[in-house]
Amino acid sequence: EALSSVLSMIGFSYVALRAVDLLRAVVEKRHAPPDLFSLINYLLPFHMLAAGPIQAYDEFARQPAVPASLSPRDVLESVERITLGLFKKFVLAYAIQSIFLTDFEADGLYFFLEVQVFFLWLYLDFSAYSDIAVGVGRLLGVATPENFNRPYLARNAIDFWNRWHISLAQFVRRNLFIPIQLHLTRRFEGRYPLLIASVAFSIAFVLCGLWHGLSINFLLWGAIHALALVIANAWRFYLKKRLGTAGVKRYMADRRIEWLARIVTYEYVAFSLVVLFIP
């Protein structure tokens, strides 16, 4: 039910984010106010309306007025991308949902497996929309940002949000995290950088959670991710201070650490979804 409620409002949610991006661009005088046709094209792109991606207004404004002509190769690649999305959505995701996700049971090993399968289903279903949007965008000559980059390989929360729902993470970064961080940095004259980053992460991702849905479940989900981001950032600060640049490079290159970090990150993100189903 939590997922259904979010999907029912998702179109409006994405329009609201685009409106914020547009408003900031105009208020900060980076761009002139768009004409009505451009405004509608930016706020209501039919292929990005259901589930993103979220195109930054700066990127939209840089697009040529007349799209470049497509080569046969461009058309083929676009159709292949759309086909991949349809296959993910209506074959893989549908099969997983029909076979494994008929009912959640909070019972030991079975519950653990259900969480893994649900996260896999969510990735396939969500990334399918993005594949279709990118493919349709190419056919229309509309720049459509990539939204996923193998998030299952992320080694910490910061890395995860550079790979999962990338356009949303970038929106949060430019419209919430950076403004909060800059304000606090100026307020405290450059002191307490780690604390300031932690506060900025916390505020930004609690609000990100509430954007998904105005409920305690999504607030908790946002707080769980905020905590992971704070820990990942603090760990990065600690490693740099303790090991130095050369030591950090050796640490990052260690394959055992890399795979352990990937497993921990994957499981943390997967189990963060459980709070969405708490009554």
Image (cartoon, rainbow, N blue to C red):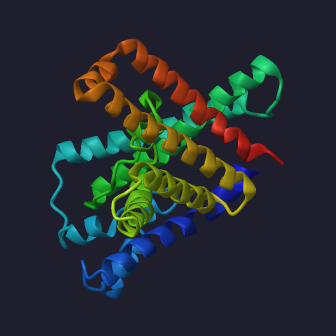
Instruction: Look at the image and tell me whether residue 53 can be seen.
Output: no
Q: Nearer the viewer, residue 37 or 261?
A: 261
Give above or below for 118 relative to 250: below
Give above or below for 102 relative to 230: above
Q: Position of residue 119 (x, y in %)?
A: 60, 34
Q: Disc count in the image?
A: 0
Q: Position of residue 1 (x, y in %)?
A: 76, 51
Instruction: Look at the image and tell me whether residue 20 can be seen.
Output: yes
Q: Nearer the viewer, residue 137 or 117?
A: 117
User: Residue at the location (76% across, 17% down)?
Assistant: 109
Q: Position of residue 134 (x, y in %)?
A: 35, 50
The single residue placed furthest to the top in the displayed view is: 256
Q: Position of residue 143 (x, y in %)?
A: 28, 59
Q: Nearer the viewer, residue 94 or 160?
A: 160
Seen in the image, is 141 located left or right of residue 278?
left
Give above or below for 76 relative to 265: below
User: Residue at the location (32% across, 76% down)?
Assistant: 25
Q: Quadrant of residue 100?
A: top right
User: Residue at the location (28% across, 22% down)?
Assistant: 247
Seen in the image, is 133 located left or right of residue 210?
left
Q: Quadrant of residue 54?
A: bottom left
